[in-house]
């Protein structure tokens, strides 16, 4: 591999790792800081991706679209739609114990998949949406991938900044207090439901934006492309290995996990073609076992939660 | 029968009981009273190893009891009735009582008869789900479940907590009746006056330490105790 | 039409109910949602496929062996994962269950591939009643009869035996069960064991009625959870009623909405329940 080939692979790798890192930051807001159990990440991701695809594309006879919105609007809209979805799912579940949210997020991810699969007018069904615009391609030309990586990094920086700022504020302190002891927080007059909802919605917003970036970068999305459990699971591993409730750790966790995940692909891709299904399954088993080992042996991940002054 | 020697106990690293001693003799009713947050329930729980014991010694019939397994304590003749959630609500009254005999089924029938004799209202409701009973009857189920284990010493954590006033005296009378069948009783009680009236001896706790220790009558007559802890 | 849908719903509902009994008991006793339950169901079905079709052993024998092996897997998961994570927050335990689910499903995918498989070869001619209004195969009749037998056996076990009562007691109030001297470790072991047998049976019934795919159990997880929540967490009788209700609703719903949205019905019922009465129709835990 030449230097430039290596470099372009690195850019490609970091872009994907970065998009996943955005999802992981979103999950960290929900799970890390607020203790919320979201295992329907793929659903929020898909809503973001489809929103962006439908908004930015030029008219197509196959599905809804033709709005030609600029990317900045599509990113925001993707976040907002994902946030609305989170809001709706939060209403019946956030007053109850954490499991209900988990079960409901699986349900919502499944329903979203059903909608994008069955409603051809909206999303062209299983055939998916292709030729999603690549922003600034004309301006940056051969440096397009690099410019996209820059965009991803900017988004990460913004979310990282907002997360850190939020979590160090009085709002964040209450959030963590609720996570530690709901009853005590309630007794001191905090509206537990509202704080949780805000964390859930903010996290979902990030996930929606991450989904939009994914759609723009790959140029193609379909209900099958999301592999709901696999996608969700990888984001969870990023969070757990990096260290729940530590944004910096989560970013590192994202890069490490994505490295391991793509690394296993490199290995299994050497297998003969007839084993492709087995190889894919084997990769999931590997990261599954990996997760369990981390859970059992490294409860706090690589970077434990920092203690903030009360 | 029960000797607690200079015990320190609490939750995790938080010490709530700072060196308490207590004695219960066979056949007695002994009450532990004190204001909210005095650690009286924690103290009772420490005897049954339900909280972390950091120091001190508990002996029951001259055997060390510290951190004993629950079934071991039950076999030795100790039984604990928690303050809340002390029944299995979706099980019938009869099933609740039967489970008291989980460890040893010997003479279960006799024990059941004894419990139904002590608490006649339960006999009529034996097939009802315990969760549907009134507060007083639930408490009887909880007592009954403990009595099935054929305890020598019964530990009661605030037996009248949350009960309607009409039931309070009834339940305390039942405690007396249980004692008369030969069961020694150590209880923590919110209604300090009523508890001390029926107790052979009493302990007054405050902030995790012992303030007074005397016969029930003497504590009632002690003006200091009356002013500070019995509401004048 | 309605009659046929009712029957289909009853069969589907029995399958959900059988899986749901174990799910709700684990929920009540260990206090977490077991997200690998659906994939244990798949495992049972594929093991039955291995013994019946690949090794050509008699179905009843395969049924029992698959059940035992699934139960052993459930106990293994508890031993190497959930028990070790005891005391950690429930989200950690649940995400480890999600991991276990993915591992089991992909092991199945690796071993048997993604293609549809059938437990029985050939097409079975259904018995026709009421001028074609109701069609039922002998397999379906057998599934219904066996489900009734299983549910009755579970009921007798839970209401007549010491271990069964201890299970219900623990599901009601674990702390009190400990104070009462109930051997909680033993109860937990048998709860996993029984759940394994039941969910494996449910998976085999589903395979007999339809076919095998690696996602079959995962797809039933949501309906099972919905049944458990509908019936009240920790209440095995609630799970049975909930399972039948969900199964029948899903089938009847096809009269009003596209069949492809059938899986959404369980979800909708569950959300409605959470909004109206989160403790379930027959339960109390929230």
Image: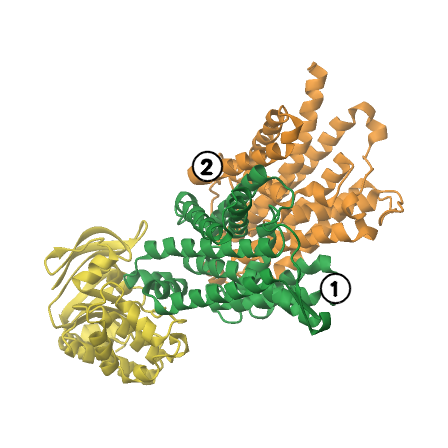
The residue beneath circle 1 is C257
For the image, the number of numbered tags is: 2
Q: Which chain is yellow?
A: B
Residue that appears at 66% across and 28% down: A273
Where does the image place residue A73, in percent across and percent down from the top left? 79, 45
CA distance separating discs 2 and 1: 44 Å
Frontmost of labels 2 and 1 is: 1
Q: Is mark 1 on a helix, strand or loop?
A: loop
Q: Residue A143 — which label? A: none
Q: Nearer the viewer, residue C136 or C40?
A: C136
> On the picture, is B119 further left or further right than A50?
left
> On the picture, is C275 further left or further right than A61?
left
Picture colour for chain A = orange
Picture colour for chain C = green
| Position of the N terminus of chain B by quadrant | bottom left
| Position of the C terminus of chain B by quadrant | bottom left
- Share a chain, discs 2 and 1? no
């Amino acid at each position: 591999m030449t230097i430039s080939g290596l470099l372009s692979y690195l850019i490609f790798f970091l872009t994907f790792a970065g998009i996943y890192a955005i999802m992981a930051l979103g999950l960290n807001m929900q799970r890390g800081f607020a203790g919320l159990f979201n295992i329907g990440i793929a659903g929020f991701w898909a809503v973001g991706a489809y929103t962006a695809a439908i908004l930015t594309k030029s008219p197509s006879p196959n599905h809804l679209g033709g709005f030609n919105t600029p990317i900045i609007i599509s990113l925001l809209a993707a976040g907002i739609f994902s946030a609305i979805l989170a809001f709706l799912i939060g209403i019946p579940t956030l007053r109850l114990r954490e499991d209900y949210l988990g079960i409901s997020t699986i349900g919502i991810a499944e329903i979203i998949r059903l909608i994008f699969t069955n409603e051809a007018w909206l999303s062209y069904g299983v055939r998916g949406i292709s030729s999603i615009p690549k922003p600034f391609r004309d301006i940056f030309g051969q440096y397009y991938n690099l410019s996209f990586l820059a965009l991803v990094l900017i988004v990460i920086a913004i979310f990282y900044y907002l997360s850190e700022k939020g979590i160090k504020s009085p709002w964040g302190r209450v959030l963590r207090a609720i996570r530690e002891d709901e009853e005590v927080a309630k007794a001191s007059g905090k509206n537990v439901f509202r704080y949780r909802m805000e964390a859930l919605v903010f996290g979902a917003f990030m996930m929606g934006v991450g989904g939009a970036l994914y759609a723009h970068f790959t140029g193609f999305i379909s209900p099958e492309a999301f592999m709901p459990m696999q996608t969700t699971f990888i984001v969870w591993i990023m969070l757990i290995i990096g260290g729940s409730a530590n944004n910096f750790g989560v970013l590192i966790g994202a890069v490490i996990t994505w490295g391991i995940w793509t690394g296993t692909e490199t290995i299994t891709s050497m297998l003969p073609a007839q084993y492709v299904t087995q190889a894919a399954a084997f990769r999931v088993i590997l990261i599954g076992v990996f997760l369990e080992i981390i859970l059992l042996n490294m409860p706090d991940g690589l970077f434990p939660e920092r203690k903030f002054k009360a | 029968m029960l000797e607690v020697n200079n015990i320190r106990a609490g939750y995790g690293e938080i010490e709530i009981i700072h060196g308490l001693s207590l004695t219960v003799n066979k056949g007695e009713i002994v009450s532990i009273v004190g204001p909210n947050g005095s650690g009286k329930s924690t103290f009772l729980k420490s005897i049954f190893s339900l909280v972390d014991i950091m120091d001190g010694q508990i002996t029951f019939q001259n055997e060390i009891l510290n951190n004993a397994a629950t079934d071991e304590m039950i076999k030795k003749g100790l039984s604990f009735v928690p303050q809340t959630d002390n029944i299995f609500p979706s099980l019938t009254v009869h099933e609740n009582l039967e489970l008291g005999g989980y460890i040893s089924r010997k003479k279960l029938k006799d024990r059941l008869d004894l419990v139904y004799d002590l608490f006649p209202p339960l006999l009529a409701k034996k097939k009802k789900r315990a969760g549907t009973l009134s507060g007083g009857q639930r408490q009887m189920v909880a007592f009954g479940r403990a009595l099935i284990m054929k305890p020598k010493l019964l530990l009661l954590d605030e037996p009248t907590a949350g009960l309607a006033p009409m039931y309070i005296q009834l339940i305390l009378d039942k405690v007396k009746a249980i004692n008369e069948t030969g069961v020694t009783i150590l209880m923590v009680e919110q209604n300090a006056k009523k508890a001390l009236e029926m107790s052979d001896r009493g302990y007054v706790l405050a902030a995790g330490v012992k303030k007074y220790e005397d016969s029930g009558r003497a504590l009632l007559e002690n003006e200091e105790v009356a002013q500070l802890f019995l509401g004048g | 039409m309605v009659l046929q849908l009712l029957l289909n719903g009853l069969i589907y509902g029995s399958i959900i109910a059988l899986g749901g009994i174990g799910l709700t008991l684990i929920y009540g006793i260990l206090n977490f949602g077991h997200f690998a339950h659906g994939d244990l169901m798949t495992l049972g079905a594929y093991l039955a496929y291995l013994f019946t079709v690949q090794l050509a052993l008699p179905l009843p024998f395969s049924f029992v062996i698959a059940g035992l092996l699934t139960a052993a897997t459930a106990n293994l998961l508890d031993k190497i994962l959930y028990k070790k994570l005891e005391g950690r927050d429930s989200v950690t335990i649940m995400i480890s269950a999600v991991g276990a689910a993915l591992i089991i499903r992909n092991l199945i995918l690796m071993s048997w591939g993604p293609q549809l498989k059938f437990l029985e070869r050939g097409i079975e001619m259904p018995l026709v009643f009421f001028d074609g209004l109701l069609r039922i195969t002998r397999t379906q009749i057998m599934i219904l009869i066996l489900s009734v037998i299983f549910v009755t056996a579970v009921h007798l076990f839970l209401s007549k035996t010491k271990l069964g009562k201890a299970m219900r007691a623990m599901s009601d109030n674990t702390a009190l069960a400990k104070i009462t001297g109930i051997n909680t470790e033993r109860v937990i072991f048998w709860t996993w064991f029984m759940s394994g047998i039941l969910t494996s049976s449910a998976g085999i019934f589903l395979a007999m009625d339809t076919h095998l795919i690696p996602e079959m159990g995962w797809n039933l997880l949501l309906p099972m959870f919905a049944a458990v929540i509908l019936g009240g967490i920790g209440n095995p009788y609630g799970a049975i009623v909930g399972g039948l209700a969900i199964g029948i609703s899903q089938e009847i719903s096809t009269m009003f909405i596209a069949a492809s949205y059938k899986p959404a019905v369980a979800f909708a019922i569950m959300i409605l329940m959470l909004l109206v009465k989160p403790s379930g129709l027959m339960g109390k835990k929230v």
